[in-house]
């Protein structure tokens, strides 16, 4: 991966039993496309909840919300 591509974000789908990594810039479209094509638009696939929790914790710390 080059710096210009950015990080890859883990996406999970409990309905399909799959896990994949998607470039940051493509996450929103990839999740929406997966859900539309395989789950009739239901929000089944999502960014890994553990990653979202970690990002929220870091944001709170960096923003001083925990002080």
Image: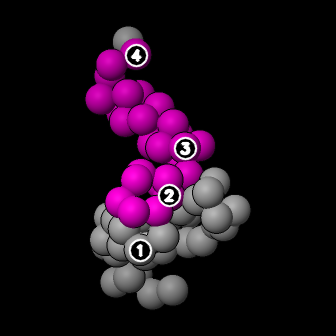
Q: CA distance from mark 2 to mark 4?
A: 30 Å
Q: Which residues are magenta?
A: 39-66
Residue in the picture at 37% in, 36% down: 59
Dot 3 alpha-carbon crowd within 10 angstroms: few under 14, some 14 to 19, many 20 or more = few
Specify the label residue 37 is tagged with: 1
In the rendered structure, the answer to whether residue 13 lies left or right of residue 44 reads right
x, y (%) of residue 35?
Answer: 42, 64
Please, is residue 41 above or below residue 34 in the view? above
Chain-order first, disc 3 or disc 1: 1
Specify the label residue 50 is tagged with: none
Q: Secondary structure at mark 4?
A: loop
Tell me, yes or no, whether the highlighted magenta stretch contains residue 52: yes
Chain-order first, disc 4 or disc 1: 1
Residue in the picture at 34% in, 83% down: 4
x, y (%) of residue 57?
Answer: 47, 32
Q: Secondary structure at mark 1?
A: helix
Dot 2 alpha-carbon crowd within 10 angstroms: few under 14, some 14 to 19, many 20 or more = many
Q: CA distance from mark 4 to mark 3?
A: 21 Å
x, y (%) of residue 40?
Answer: 39, 63
Point out the image quarter for the C terminus. Answer: top left
Q: Which residue is mark 3?
A: 49
Q: Which residue is mark 4?
A: 66
- Res 19 quadrant in image: bottom right
Q: Secondary structure at mark 2?
A: strand
Dot 4 alpha-carbon crowd within 10 angstroms: few under 14, some 14 to 19, many 20 or more = few
Q: Which residue is mark 2?
A: 45
Chain-order first, disc 2 or disc 4: 2
């Amino acid at each position: 991966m080059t710096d210009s591509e950015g990080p890859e974000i883990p996406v999970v789908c409990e309905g399909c039993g799959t896990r994949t990594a998607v470039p940051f810039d493509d996450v929103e479209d990839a999740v929406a496309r997966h859900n539309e094509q395989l789950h009739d638009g239901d929000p089944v696939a999502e960014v890994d909840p553990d990653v979202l929790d970690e990002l929220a914790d870091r944001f709170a710390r960096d923003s001083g919300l925990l002080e």
